[in-house]
Image: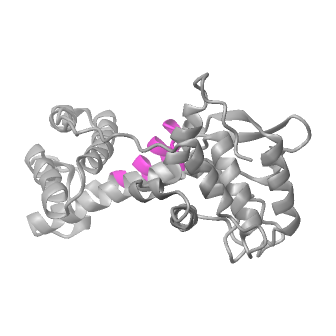
């Protein structure tokens, strides 16, 4: 009788040993892998008329994976980029299976050979110096969250940090004596020290004086209106709010989709020698 390998037998080891311990992925990356595998298993269960916990590795063949990728791109209307992210997670899962079960090596190889789909690369949105200044000028430091928002924008402009790095930064990561710097934890849990301008240091100090955490032990620097660590959604909301406000004075912002990564590109552009703008 042919040996069958239940999918359920591999889930814990894949997420908590392979992805976390061996590959050292962050919790956010592991959640992205989880979402991809969950969608795949639900699709497989519906297609094969099986319960999810009855699925086997053998059920997840090349044809089913291709049907799944077609499903998320056409029926769920996901972008090619999202399709490729899902496929990368699936490839990683079958890489793990091939290490655990040598008799499934050929089965895994066929799935890991499914190519990523080429996608058009959109032009990166960028900000001009006057647009940056307009957004910063739109912050009213006397409003309820004005000191936080000014510190947040200066931090983004100054460091070019990824949104997750902004969320993760703690007060203990800051060195606000001259010269100021902040320790950031990036992808792959790599740490780097980033200098911060005197203007940024001053804005952060002013914010910390009025910072009101919900829990006295809360160490994350940037908090939401409820005193808890700010989220990706919260940062995007703040950016959208002030970009809309600034567009009344700087009409060119009306034609731009501005988000956290826009500021990262802006910070990178200041590395070019001819760009010496610094918000005032």
Pinpoint residue 123: horizontal percent, then vertical percent.
Answer: 34, 40
Along the viewing direction, whichever of 208 and 229 lies nearer the viewer: 208
The vertical placement of 109 against 82, above or below, is: above
| Numbered marks: total | 0
Along the viewing direction, whichever of 23 and 182 lies nearer the viewer: 182
Pinpoint residue 59: horizontal percent, then vertical percent.
Answer: 14, 53
- Viewed as shown, does residue 123 lie left or right of 200? left
Along the viewing direction, whichever of 52 and 66 lies nearer the viewer: 66
- Viewed as shown, does residue 265 lie left or right of 40? right
Residue 175 painted magenta: no
Pinpoint residue 125: horizontal percent, then vertical percent.
Answer: 42, 44
- Considering every residue shown, the one lying at the far right of the view is 177
From where the camera sits, is residue 185 visible?
Answer: no
Along the viewing direction, whichever of 230 and 14 lies nearer the viewer: 230
Q: Residue at x 66, y 56 (%)?
A: 136
Question: For the magenta stretch, what is the residue range?
Answer: 10-26
Judged by its main secondary structure, the magenta piece is helix
Q: Residue at x 38, y 51 (%)?
A: 33
Q: Residue at x 68, y 64 (%)?
A: 139
Pinpoint residue 238: horizontal percent, then vertical percent.
Answer: 58, 65
- Considering every residue shown, the one lying at the far top of the view is 273
Q: Residue at x 55, y 40 (%)?
A: 266
From where the camera sits, is residue 118 visible?
Answer: yes
């Amino acid at each position: 009788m042919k040996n069958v390998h239940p999918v359920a037998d591999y889930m814990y080891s894949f997420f908590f040993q392979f992805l976390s311990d061996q590959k050292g992925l962050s919790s956010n990356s592991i959640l992205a892998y989880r979402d991809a595998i969950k969608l795949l298993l639900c699709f497989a269960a519906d297609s094969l008329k099986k319960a999810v916990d009855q699925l086997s590795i053998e059920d997840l063949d090349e044809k089913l994976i291709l049907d799944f990728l077609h499903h998320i791109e056409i029926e769920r209307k996901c972008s090619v980029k999202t399709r490729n992210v899902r496929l990368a997670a699936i490839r990683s899962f079958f890489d793990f299976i091939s290490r655990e079960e040598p008799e499934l090596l050929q089965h895994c190889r066929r799935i890991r050979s499914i190519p990523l789909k080429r996608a058009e690369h959109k032009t990166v949105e960028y900000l001009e110096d006057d647009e940056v200044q307009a957004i910063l000028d739109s912050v009213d430091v006397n409003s309820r969250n004005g000191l936080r928002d000014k510190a947040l924008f200066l931090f983004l402009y100054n460091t070019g940090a990824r949104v997750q790095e902004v969320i993760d930064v703690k007060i203990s990561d800051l060195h606000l004596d001259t010269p100021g710097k902040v320790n950031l934890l990036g992808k792959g849990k790599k740490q780097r020290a980033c200098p911060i301008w005197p203007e940024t240091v001053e804005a952060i100090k002013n914010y910390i004086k009025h910072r009101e955490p919900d829990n006295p032990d809360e160490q994350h620097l940037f908090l939401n209106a409820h005193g808890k660590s700010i989220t990706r959604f919260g940062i995007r909301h703040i950016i959208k709010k002030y970009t809309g406000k600034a567009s009344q004075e700087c009409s060119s912002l009306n034609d731009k989709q501005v988000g956290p990564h826009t500021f990262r590109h802006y910070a990178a552009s200041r590395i070019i020698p001819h760009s010496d703008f610094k918000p005032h």
